[in-house]
Amino acid sequence: MQSRQAQAAPSIPRWLRFVLRSDRAGSAWFIGLGFFFAPVLIVVSPWPALTKALWVAIALAGLWLGLLGIAMATGLAMVLRTGAELSEDYWRSIIDYPGALKTHAPAMSARAKTHAPQGNAGAGAARQSNVAAGAAPPLLRR
């Protein structure tokens, strides 16, 4: 009975944070470098081998971002399949908002914790995010 309850507890894959951060950073670099790609192609157009190498580099970067997108969708689907939700603190830790809580452990939202099966209901209260508790987000407070 206890092993079934332990298995039912939702968990967030460790690699999901890496994938989400890598996708965010990679997309920003890809878009940023895209603005400089056309002028560089014009400059190196007399050398077909160099032009081809640049196109291959851009194609590989796009393929890598596509694979990260598939991994991100898979990881988020795994979390949602357990019936859990990712807390606001988890998303803020990936986006690096100023004032975000730096938690290394995966966090679930208060709603997901109330819907998740608990082995021991009296084992401490779950910490809720500011928004879940009804307070204004930190950026809107004065």
Image (cartoon, rainbow, N blue to C red):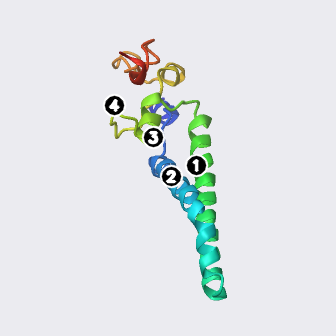
Image: 58 above or below 129:
below
The tag earlier along the polypeptide, 3 or 2, is 2
Of the two numbered discs 4 and 2 in the rendering, the one whose residue sits closer to the viewer: 4
Of the two numbered discs 1 and 4 in the rendering, the one whose residue sits closer to the viewer: 4
The tag earlier along the polypeptide, 1 or 3, is 1
Rate crowding at label 2 as few (under 14), some (14 to 19) or many (20 or more) other CA atoms within 10 Å: many
The tag earlier along the polypeptide, 4 or 2, is 2
Tell me the CA gap for discs 3 and 2.
12 Å
Q: The disc labelled 4 sits on which kind of residue?
A: Gly
Q: In the rendered image, which quarter contains the C terminus? A: top left
| Labelled pair 3, 2 in contact (Cβ < 8 Å) | no
Horizontal and vertical percent for residue 91?
47, 36
Q: Which residue is mark 4?
A: 99
Image: 90 above or below 63:
above
Q: Secondary structure at mark 4?
A: loop
Q: Which residue is mark 1?
A: 72
In the displayed structure, does residue 135 sit left or right of residue 52? Answer: left
Q: The disc labelled 3 sits on which kind of residue?
A: Ile
Q: Secondary structure at mark 2?
A: helix
